[in-house]
Image (cartoon, rainbow, N blue to C red):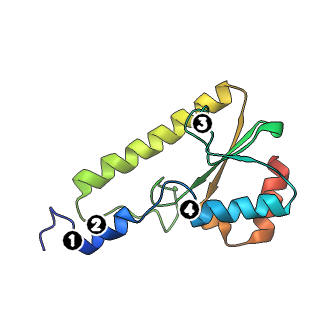
Amino acid sequence: MSESRPSVARSRTMRAIRKKNTKPEIRVRRRLHALGYRFRLHRSDLPGTPDIVLPKHRVAIQVHGCFWHQHRGCRHAVRPRIRPDYWLPKLERNVARDHETKAALEALGWRVLVIWECELANDHALDDRLKKFI
C-alpha cells in the first residue's frame, strides 16, 4: 500500500464519521436534559452552527472531538503519520475555524463552552461543569 493513497478500509472509516449527532454530543445532550435544561440543536443562524444552544441563557456549547479539533495536550490528538501533507493543514484549518467561530459568537453576546470528547468520562464532573457555566 502506498503512503500517498488511503486504503479502502480507511476511506470507509473516515466516511462513517458524522458531523452532527455524534456519540459525545448525544452524551452531553442527555446530561443537559437530565439537569433540566432545554436546548436547541445546530442553530444554522448562528456562526459555526453550534452543536447545542441554550437560548434562554445565551449559551452555545460546542462538543469537539479531540483528534479533529486537536485538543492540546490530549493523547487522542495525535498527529497523523500517513499523508501529513493532507492532514496537518486540514486539522490546522479546523482549529483556526474554531477560534473564529468562538470569537464571532462572543461578539454577538453568546457565551461559548467547549467540551472535549476526552472530558466525557465522568458524568458528575460534566454535570458540575455544565451547571457552573450555565
For the residues labelled 1 and 2, say whether their Cβ atoms are less than 8 Å apart: yes
The crowding category of the residue bearing disc 3, from other C-alpha atoms within 10 Å (few below 14, some 14 to 19, many at least 20), is many
Q: How many numbered circles does the render carry? A: 4
- Asked which secondary structure carries label 2, the reply is helix
Kindly identify which residue carries mark 1: 7
User: Residue 84, image x and y in percent?
Assistant: 25, 57
Q: Earlier in the sequence, mark 2 or mark 4?
A: 2
User: Residue 127, image x and y in percent?
Assistant: 81, 62
User: Residue 119, image x and y in percent?
Assistant: 65, 65
Establish if 15 lies above or below 98.
below
Residue 11 is marked as 2
- Asked which secondary structure carries label 3, the reply is helix
Gap between marks 3 and 2 measured at Cα: 30 Å
Q: Earlier in the sequence, mark 3 or mark 2?
A: 2
For the point 79% across and 55% down, the residue is 130
Q: Is residue 62 left or right of residue 29?
A: left
Gap between marks 1 and 4 measured at Cα: 24 Å
Residue 69 is marked as none
For the point 82% across and 46% down, the residue is 134
Q: Earlier in the sequence, mark 1 or mark 4?
A: 1
Of the two numbered discs 4 and 3 in the rendering, the one whose residue sits closer to the viewer: 4
For the residues labelled 2 and 4, say whether their Cβ atoms are less than 8 Å apart: no
Kindly identify which residue carries mark 4: 22
Q: Mark 3 is on which residue type?
A: Lys
For the point 39% across and 42% down, the residue is 93
Residue 102 is marked as 3
User: Residue 19, image x and y in percent?
Assistant: 49, 54
Q: Is residue 50 left or right of residue 8?
A: right
